[in-house]
Amino acid sequence: MNVRTFRIGGVHPEENKLTHEVATKVAALPKQAIFPLSQHIGAPAKPVVAKGDKVKVGTMIAEAGGFVSAPIFSSVSGTVFKIDTAIDATGYRKPVIIINVEGDEWEESIDRSDKLETVEAHPELTPEEIVNRIKAAGVVGMGGACFPTFIKLCPPPTAKAECVIINAVECEPYITADFRLMMEHADEILIGLELLMKGAKVTTGYIGIETNKMPAIELLTKKCAEKFGSSAYHVEVVPLAQRYPQGGEKQLVDAVIRRQVPAPPAIPVNVGAIVQNVGTAYAVYEAVMKNKPLFERYTTVTGKRLQNPGNFLVRMGTPMKDLIEACGGMPEGDNKLLAGGPMMGKALTSVEVPICKGTNSVTIISGEEAFRKEPNPCIRCAKCVSACPMGLEPYLLAKLAAVKNWERAEHEEVVSCIECGSCQFTCPAHRPLLDNIRQAKSTVMGIIRARAAAAQKK
Amino acid sequence: MDFILIAVAVLGAIGLIAALVLYVCSKKFAVYEDPRIAQVTEQLPGANCGGCGFAGCGGLADALVKGADAGSIDGLKCPVGGAEVMGKVADLLGMAIANGEPMVAVVRCNGNCEVRPKIAEYSGLRTCAAMNSCGAGETACGFGCLGCGDCVAACQFDAIHMNPETGLPEVDEEKCTSCGACVKACPRHIIELRKKGPKGRRVFVSCVNKDKGPVAMKACKSACIGCGKCEKECKFGAITVEGNVSYIDFNKCRLCKKCVEACPTKAIHAVNFPAPKPKPEIPESPVKPETQESPANNQRKEEQA
């Protein structure tokens, strides 16, 4: 087997995929569902319901608030309790729509049958129609970044798409939601990929999977050969070596098609690649073929001390508390609750935070592991430099951030940082490198934006 | 002998030519700098703190001289030097200045460790900016002081310090020059420059929490809940409640302290007022405090028993 990987940097954290063999369960309906209006990158959605309105499963409750935005659909049936604020994954109180759940009544337009719809059977699906349906269903990147999917399919005129790469890497430790999705819905994913290729008007597709998911590689290779063997599409399953952060867009493009995405503002499509998460491919299938908007997703609930960690098909808006209860409750003692995995996940201070479009995992790190170790002075070992997948010098950037030398930080390409945390993970002195670099990155990006705005004024 | 003469002549000629070139250049490419700029710079404190909004004292001096030429130096002020320095500068430039009221930095958060309990432990980089970007911080209040002392680090005059008992920064009024560095450093915009007030007396709302009353109250017992009692109490229209938080306009406030008494959560603070207020109350109703205390004492005794 020809195993590929990205060229520079990377680390290999302990995998801890505790739930690889745990089949997906359907999570119980919550009593009250919470829908943050900002579940995606871009403008927050605007509510289109009011207090007391009745909604069904799949009813649009908030429309897109701009071009880079996505509508939000109710995942439950019931009554709108209120439009208020609640703590979301940012840790702050943000505008949300709260719905009291009553029964489970779906919109009639949604096809709930298990019948597999093929693209060949639907000649009405032109590329434009596919993109429109994806847009209308509120599909966003399901890997965590939540970038609206339809925009990725319509590249700027300066770039030309050549292939679609399905990101099934799942390089974060603990998370297994994508693996379970591939094992349980391989056919739907491949149709989703076909729709994405048709929507983007390309005929080449790749599915990048790390070799710790051999069953998925074997299954998808077999299904691909059956499905695309004699078609006009060229689809290839690419086995990738286990290395974090292979699931980063730029790293995946490098690993799969050996092209390097230039520094921001360049995006993968500038080198011809459209990268979509495997969960997104599934959501695209459901949105286009089943007319089902994005309101549920696969999520892993995991942690070493959790009694029954598992994978769940969750209605969005379900508080994390409910899922943790379903896994045996919060373990005793000190715990760190993360939305996402241990490398890039966001620590939360409340278990009331709902599952959103981008919540691929709820990870609970317990006991000693929940705390950081005391930082020591930098010993200039440069391990962070070898670990950085973007070829940056993390120790230097962190130092520049600490002394607030934003000018030099910009010169050292701090905006290229993908915040993967490899530097901090690998640092033998436990220095808070990424904390510092994040400060520099956000400040420098602010300076660049202000400069661009000033230039536009002139 | 000749050879000494030649050397002297050649060197003399070179010197002469160089002097000529230098003279011509210094005349031709001379940059005129107003002598007043140097004079004004001399008057300024020279800390280059940036409190005036310019990069340093030189920048302000330049702006002052230009302003004087244009006929007005309004809005240009050295917050560190204050009225004294600005008076000297105005004399130098032959301008009159509006005597600005002295200002002082005010920390608008009173969520100490007692009233605002910790709900989480933060173990990342201990700066307010880093903690602010990760979420609400260690308490449930998403608006209040994070307690890592970015303001302390920003102060060049050693005028702001963390009080370890309350976990909140405290401003040393004597040292504070109202340069505004702490205002800029605070990621939550808690610190505000307010009028120092007569004898340093001032009244302000020590909270910036914009959450609705019950939510704010849950996070912090002394949060402003936006009830509007102070707004009703104020006879001078100095108080406005906007976005669930009250704000006192220091230009309108007449320091009557009615709002301080009206505030149900004690979020409004009055500072530097003399203390004798409770004294007249004691002779009038000497029983009151006792009755207030005694049930509590009894309860405590019962509990102990």
Image (spheres, coloured by chain):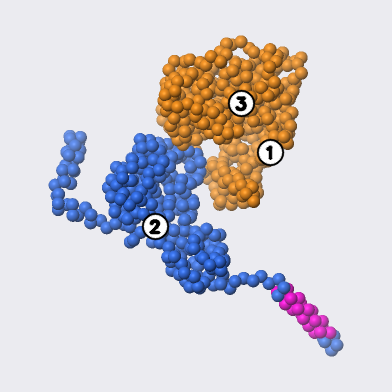
Chain colours: A orange, B blue
Which residues are the magenta region? B6-26
Where disc 3 sits, the SS reads helix
Residue type for callout 1:
Ala
Same subunit, tags 2 and 3? no
Pointer 2 local density, CA inside 10 Å: few below 14, some 14–19, many at least 20:
many
Which comes before the other along the chain, label 1 or label 3?
A: 3
Distance in Å between CA atoms under marks 2 and 1: 49 Å
Q: Which mark is residue A135?
A: 3
Q: Which mark is residue B78?
A: none
In the image, taking residue B305 as reference, residue A205 lies left or right, namely right
Residue A430 point in image, percent of width and height: 54, 41
Residue marked by disc 1? A266
Q: Nearer the viewer, residue B60 or A28?
A: B60
Residue type for callout 3:
Lys
Residue marked by disc 2? B195
In the image, taking residue B302 as reference, residue B48 lies left or right, namely right
Residue B38 point in image, percent of width and height: 56, 71
